[in-house]
Amino acid sequence: MAIKTYNDAPYNDDFNSNSVQFTGAEGKNYLRILFRPGRSVQVRELNQMQSILQSQIDKFGQSIYKEGPILDGKGNLDNNVKYIDVLFNGTGSATPATIITYIDQVLKIKTNAGLKASVLHYEALSTDNTYRFFIRYDSSIQSGGLNVQEYNVSDVLELDSAIIDPLNPSTELVNTGISFSTVTATGHGAVAKTDAGVYFINGEFVYNDAEELYIAKPSESYTLNGKVAFIVTDTVVTYVTDPLLLDNATGTPNETAPGADRYKIDFQLAFLSDNDDDLVANNTGVSFINDVQSYITLFETDLDVVVKPARTEYTQLDRKFANRTFEESGDYCLKPFKLDLREYLNDEDGNRGRYTTSDITDLDAIGKIDLDGETSAVYGEKH
């Protein structure tokens, strides 16, 4: 894929222009810009100088890697997550305004009866003072002879960890045990996680921090089917959005000297669904796959199970190594496969049969073969 360039004003980088009237620097195979004394430096030349270098990196990268993760960046899916929708309605020190201001400190919650949970993630909902907490239960309680393990609608929640004044750590703004909200809905969820890693995309090697995406399922029996991916977006950052781009020659940002803009690639962790309206409507991090222009697949899910996890893929290098390994060593196993041939019917007299009479489902079977999994190389490829 060609690198991203900005042909139009104000950047005027015509590096990969393919218009009828003009062929860009790439088409003419210009590899360097040779500056001369006494001639002004063009904005186009300064931007094109970067494009020439990036194009060389892109060509080298494509000769080794396919687009996707190249260093770490592994992902996984955890379905052992619950969520609750809560209405902030506390009084006194625990007013909704206070809780919302310091919501990052709402880490531990409980009911008056002592059912405790940890808050893993929160999202603001469309209704005023209403939030969704993704939680993991830390305890259960006995109530009316029953073992209660989850919150119910109308349960009143209390803080199980105090909210501290960040400007005065010795002061508690909201004490432990103060009621601050009421449960309005409960449900099941999942969290997709990805490690920090480096990805090759659009001719660039892009680093991204570890991320988590919490998903509210429409029902308890619902299973996730789709792709967990990074949505890729090209953006231009100016001093308006990042004041640190102002000239800092004097040690502080100079508002009269804006300086150059910056090009960046943003990754947004998302779950991509084919056609599930309910899942998309109830989650800000879920999109229809056909609505996304550019993305990197981290892994696919089928019935809540991770399948086809992304891995580093090479264009030619791995095939060359595989051919060399096959020519040198042929096909081989690291350890021999262990084959165990057993009688199908267990006569309960030591014949090592697999099933007793009551267990048998296939009356025509006469034996059972067990084969232990091992690692082998076939045509130089690991299996």
Image (cartoon, rainbow, N blue to C red):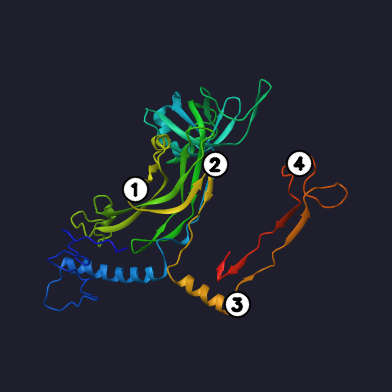
Task: Give the alpha-carbon distance from disc 3 to disc 4, as whole Å.
Answer: 45 Å
Q: Marks 3 and 4: which is nearer the front?
A: 4
Give the residue type that dot 1 points to. Answer: Val
- Compare marks 3 and 1 and give the one earlier in the sequence: 1
Q: Which residue is mark 3?
A: 329
Q: Which residue is mark 2?
A: 79
Left of 202 or right of it: where is 187? right
Residues marked 2 and 1 touching at CB (< 8 Å): no
Q: Marks 4 and 1: which is nearer the front?
A: 4
x and y percent of residue 69 in the render?
Answer: 44, 60
Q: Residue furthest right?
A: 349
At 34% from the left and 64% from the top, the residue drawn is: 203
x and y percent of residue 65 in the render?
Answer: 42, 66
Task: Give the alpha-carbon distance from disc 2 to disc 1, as whole Å.
Answer: 25 Å
Residues marked 2 and 4 touching at CB (< 8 Å): no
Of 14 and 222, the residue lying toward us: 222
- Compare marks 4 and 1 and give the one earlier in the sequence: 1
Give the residue type that dot 3 points to. Answer: Ser
Task: Give the alpha-carbon distance from disc 4 to disc 1, as whole Å.
Answer: 51 Å
Left of 214 or right of it: where is 353? right
Q: Name the quadrant containing residue 56.
A: bottom left
**The N terminus lies in quadrant:** bottom left
Task: Give the alpha-carbon distance from disc 2 to disc 3, as whole Å.
Answer: 43 Å
Left of 118 or right of it: where is 37? left
